[in-house]
Image (cartoon, rainbow, N blue to C red):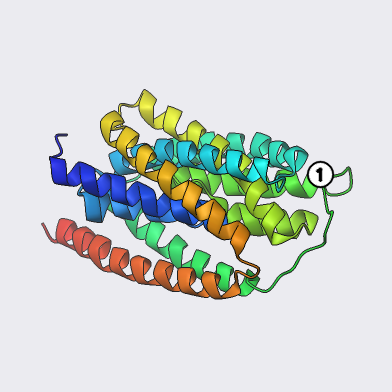
């Protein structure tokens, strides 16, 4: 696959958007990576878009994690527990995802985005419990949530932070800011696992990934600074959920059209 200069510039812009939202809300940004790759940058193969975005999101999440670690908002034990079980799920999910038709995968992805937008709206007012952490009592719950969200992450080639944040809150009752920082441990691990699986099948555009990552590093720094400056994210969550709904609707129309056209032919 050969891309032109404009497409690479759009790749850098897309990376900046994803990096900013990852740093700001700890998740949700990665779910925009695949549609940006396909519909804005113009990557022809959905599977290459998924593999490339998985690698880029992992790198951007690692940058965001470093920012949150310096701010002291990461619960490392919870993050590693969640990531350990999630990697198993991501391996299984990515193996299944590569076997699914690309347009069907995009259609299912859009349906997931609708569910995610709804989930974000429902969770926007949850304050959490200050000082909450992982222990023997909640560890099985943390591992269970990790396995499930890892499977979704691998199947769709996304970081999964939008599921990990509510998963951490549900399993540990930690505050949203700690869940955001901690989620990036798992987002990094899930993205790398999925990217390795796709790379083994030759489904990554390495140059585009590098440019996407560069844009994401800049966006991630800005997003993390904005996150620390905001006292409440309820309004931001509503706006971001609205963006997810809009992108999902666009993807449904485009992917459904392609599926029906293929069926008709």
Question: What's the residue at 57%, 73% (across, down)?
Answer: 121
Q: Where is 112 relative to 10, above or below?
A: below
Residue 129 falls in which quadrant of the image?
bottom right
Whether residue 79 sits left or right of residue 223 in the image: it is right
Question: What's the residue at 37%, 66% (across, down)?
Answer: 248
Query: Which secondary structure, mark 1?
Result: helix
Residue situated in front as seen by the camera: 189 or 22: 22
Whether residue 237 sits left or right of residue 133 in the image: it is left
Residue situated in front as seen by the camera: 104 or 174: 174
Question: What's the residue at 77%, 64% (across, down)?
Answer: 128
Q: Where is residue 148 in the image (x, y as percent from the top left)?
A: 62, 48
Residue 248 visible, this angle: yes
Residue 211 falls in which quadrant of the image?
top left
- How many C-alpha atoms fall within 10 Å of the one at disc 1: few (<14), some, or many (≥20)? some
Whether residue 121 sits left or right of residue 202 in the image: it is right
Can you say which quadrant of the picture contains the C terminus? bottom left
Can you say which quadrant of the picture contains the N terminus? top left
Q: Position of residue 53 (x, y in %)?
A: 37, 42
Q: Badge 1 is on which residue?
A: 139
Question: What's the residue at 52%, 75% (across, down)?
Answer: 238
Residue situated in front as seen by the camera: 86 or 262: 86
How many numbered marks appear?
A: 1
Q: Position of residue 178 (x, y in %)?
A: 71, 53
Q: Where is 250 relative to 196, above or below?
A: below
Residue situated in front as seen by the camera: 144 or 100: 144
Q: Where is residue 135 in the image (x, y as percent from the top left)?
A: 87, 44
Residue 27 visible, this angle: no
């Amino acid at each position: 696959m050969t891309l032109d200069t404009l497409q690479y510039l759009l790749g850098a812009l897309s990376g900046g958007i994803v990096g900013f939202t990852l740093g700001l809300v700890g998740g949700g940004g990665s779910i925009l990576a695949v549609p940006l790759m396909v519909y804005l940058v113009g990557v022809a193969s959905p599977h290459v878009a998924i593999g490339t975005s998985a690698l880029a999101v992992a790198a951007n999440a690692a940058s965001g994690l470093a920012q949150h670690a310096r701010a002291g908002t990461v619960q490392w034990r919870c993050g590693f527990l969640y990531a350990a079980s999630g990697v198993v799920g991501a391996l299984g999910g990515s193996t299944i995802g590569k076997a699914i038709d690309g347009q069907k995968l995009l259609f299912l992805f859009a349906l997931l985005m609708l569910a995610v937008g709804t989930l974000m709206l429902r969770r926007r007012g949850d304050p959490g419990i200050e000082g909450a952490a992982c222990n023997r009592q909640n560890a099985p719950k943390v591992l269970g949530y990790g396995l499930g969200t890892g499977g979704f992450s691998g199947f769709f080639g996304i970081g999964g932070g939008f599921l990990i944040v509510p998963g951490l809150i549900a399993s540990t009752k930690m505050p949203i800011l700690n869940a955001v920082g901690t989620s990036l441990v798992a987002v990094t691990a899930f993205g790398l696992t999925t990217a390795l699986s796709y790379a083994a099948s030759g489904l990554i555009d390495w140059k585009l990934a590098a440019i996407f990552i560069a844009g994401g590093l800049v966006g991630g720094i800005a997003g993390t600074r904005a996150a620390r400056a905001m006292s409440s994210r309820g309004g931001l969550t509503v706006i971001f959920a609205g963006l997810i709904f809009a992108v999902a609707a666009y993807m449904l129309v485009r992917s459904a059209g392609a599926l029906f056209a293929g069926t008709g032919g």
